[in-house]
Amino acid sequence: MSSYDLVVIGTGPGGYVCAIRAAQLGLKTAVVEKRAFGGTCLNIGCIPSKALLHASELFEEAGHGFEALGIKVGKPKLDLAAMMKFKDEGVDGNVKGVEYLLKKNKIDAHIGSGRIVAPGKVEVTGDAGTTTLETKAIVIATGSDVAPLKGVAIDETRIVSSTGALSLPKVPKKLLIVGAGVIGLELGSVWRRLGAEVEVVEFLDRIVPGIDLDVARQFQRILQKQGFAFRLSTKVTGIDTSGSRLKATVEPAAGGEAAIIECDVALIAIGRVPYTDGLGLDAVGVARDDRGRVITDAHFATNVPGIYAIGDVIAGPMLAHKAEDEGVAVAEILAGKAGHVNYDVIPGVVYTMPELASVGKTEEELKAAGIAYNVGKFPFTANGRAKVNRQTDGFVKILADAKTDRVLGVHILGPDAGNMIAEAAVAMEFGASSEDIARTCHAHPTLTEAVKEAALAVEKRAIHM
Ligand code: FAD
Ligand code: NAI
């Protein structure tokens, strides 16, 4: 029987980062993985979706945007198999990178399904049979799985989750997407750019719930301009698979007359649920909430001594970087240090074109909390670099406390917003005011000048507007 200071179950961004940090701090560490190193993010999430977003964006630009820049390439032809190979090679390279890092940090990797048989004991069942690992601490980092839609069976061929939508063998003529969240809009963008007609059915009366409403509305207008069709306040009640085309029955969310939408592929993207199958949590008494999430305290400890949990399997945004930061924090806590995650400053990015990136509070949240705030907004149409690049959709919006001027939220809809939001996150982590950002010299000509101008706009003194 092998004996460890720490066994981490799951090697997604939460688990593998936790294991590396623990090993760096001198803990004898093992990981258990039943699928592939890197978890959802590397294998069927962040990395393959970003590879396809990148390739499809270039495909679309080659078709519509290059000529205006004086680049004649003719009508681009799609080689979908080659694009999928490009995506798979990107995934493979990243997965191998995780394997290398685990080895480099002398972390034992046990391949198989992990089950907690008692505090301090993890049983691993794989091709090599069953072994039991003894450990002082266990970190559950088993992630999440696709949320099912009642009455609709995902076959990953015609009715797909994000996993199937990342590997379609041909471009569907019509793609129906259930759920106008992050997955629906990112993967909808991929297939629209490659030639599919895309219609999105969303239960709520708005897209991307949780995002600042003003930003979400503008985002919807831009996506519609690109060719997305939206049916809001609508639900899918069933999908008939008997014919050569799928027939989805939709109804107003509040009830009413049903209608049929015909499509070739339907993507179900209505959220994700924590994944704890086969972990043995009930037998050892690890408490979960009503949504199946493992309940933890501020130090990631569950109610059972020696068992901790991080990432998608616990509460909070289901994001890779949130899982990573929790992995580092719990490793530091286990090594006797003061690990901590600041949940007020976790950026979120939707990698469409334009990108949508946010950190901190939305206007709706500030209103609900009764906090008085000032708004500074600056459009990319007034930013020199965006103009010359012909990427002027969107704006930067900064919300600052009316009394102290402290930055409470930053929302960027625009080209490269995902990179630009890092400036806002650093500023907020240091408790910056909008004036601090406004007085920081930003290089010219860059898109980041729009952030500075939005900060100036909080005091109504933007220069280029
Ligand atoms: P996971 O990455 O889910 O990893 C859990 C691991 O545990 C898996 O490898 C699983 O096989 C393993 N496991 C589970 N049970 C056991 C067991 N009993 N024994 C052994 N191993 C087990 N987030 C972003 O921040 N940016 C993005 O761009 C982004 N894009 C995404 C795109 C898609 C299509 C999807 C689906 C998700 C995306 N996400 C993105 C979300 C991101 O993937 C998750 O937030 C992140 O992977 C969570 O990390 P985790 O370590 O908690 O779990
Ligand atoms: P989501 O929570 O972002 O969006 C789901 C959408 O489906 C919501 O708008 C919701 O109102 C809607 N919905 C729910 N039930 C419905 C129903 N019955 N009919 C119609 N609409 C319905 O979930 P999504 O897009 O599946 O993504 C899952 C998770 O993966 C997210 O939490 C996200 O954080 C993560 N992710 C992150 C990415 C990123 O950071 N760029 C990319 C992709 C996923």
Image: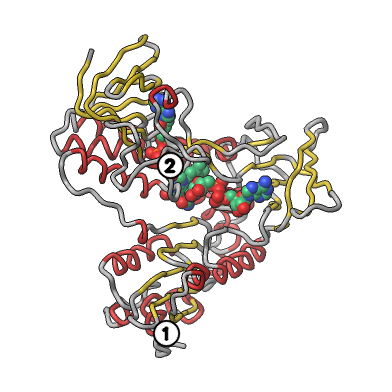
Q: Is residue 89 visible?
A: no
Q: Are marks 2 and 1 in contact (CB under 8 Å)?
A: no
Residue 156 screen position, x and y as percent: 62, 32
- Residue at x-position 39% and y-position 31%: 286
Residue 294 screen position, x and y as percent: 42, 37
Residue lying farthest right? Answer: 257
Q: Earlier in the sequence, mark 2 or mark 1?
A: 2
Residue lying farthest left? Answer: 26
Q: Which mark is residue 457?
A: 1
Closer to the eye: label 2 or 1: 2
* Residue closer to the observer: 322 or 138: 138
Query: What colouring style does the render use?
Result: secondary structure
Q: Which mark is residue 312?
A: 2
Question: Looking at the picture, does residue 138 appear above or below residue 21?
Answer: above
Quadrant of image for the N terminus: top left
Residue 27 screen position, x and y as percent: 16, 32
* Residue closer to the observer: 400 or 68: 400
- Residue at x-position 69% and y-position 46%: 175
* Residue closer to the observer: 112 or 387: 112
Label 2's element?
helix
Residue 173 screen position, x and y as percent: 73, 45
* Residue closer to the observer: 215 or 389: 215
Whereabouts is ligand 1, in terms of quadrant?
A: top left
- Residue at x-position 36% and y-position 74%: 407
Instruction: Say whether residue 228 is left or right of residue 291.
Output: right
Q: Is residue 187 visible?
A: yes
Label 1's element?
helix
Q: Amino acid at mark 1?
A: Ala
Q: Is mark 2 within 8 Å of ligand 1?
A: yes
Give the class, few, some or many, for how many residues have Cα within 10 Å of label 1's Cα (few <14, many ≥20). many
Instruction: Say whether residue 442 is left or right of residue 5.
Output: right
